[in-house]
Image (spheres, grey):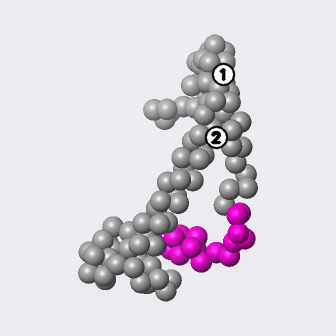
Amino acid sequence: MFPYDSTAHEATTSSGERWRTAMREFFYGFATYEIVQQAREMRGSLETLFLLALHGEIVGVPVLPPYYALRLLPYVVPQLEGWKRRVLRERELGSDHEHHLHGI
């Protein structure tokens, strides 16, 4: 038998614990989900801007001297592929904020 058996764990969780978990997830979605999504979007935008400032020459925007960009390159190599896709993706003007519920 494995040290952790999921069927045994499910049998030991009481209905009160499951109810509390469901209520916690409901209130998270009700009160903070939009805020968390907006914070993630803002973080992604700042990360895109940071990478553009460092390695803009990859997409044709020379911004910083290459010395500083090359010093930071080992730290951002894992993120470069996704960043290039985000920056070079075609977008319509104003499509970044069409799904927000500002003020609600």
Q: Earlier in the sequence, mark 2 or mark 1?
A: 1
Q: Which residue is mark 1?
A: 23
Q: Is residue 4 magenta?
A: no
Q: Work out whether 41 lies above or below 53.
A: above
Q: Work out whether 76 lies above or below 43.
A: below
Residue under the point 63% across and 13% down? 16
Residue 89 spot, x, y in % from top left: 64, 75
Which of the 4 quarters of the picture holds residue 18? top right
Residue 80 spot, x, y in % from top left: 46, 73
Residue under the point 52% across and 58% down? 44
Residue 34, disc? 2
Q: Work out whether 94 lies above or below 15.
A: below
Q: Residue furthest bottom?
A: 60
Q: Work out whether 72 lies above or below 62.
A: above
Q: Which residues are magenta?
A: 80-95
Residue 75 spot, x, y in % from top left: 33, 67
Where disc 1 sits, the SS reads helix
Closer to us: 15 or 77: 77
Q: Main secondary structure of the magenta part?
A: helix
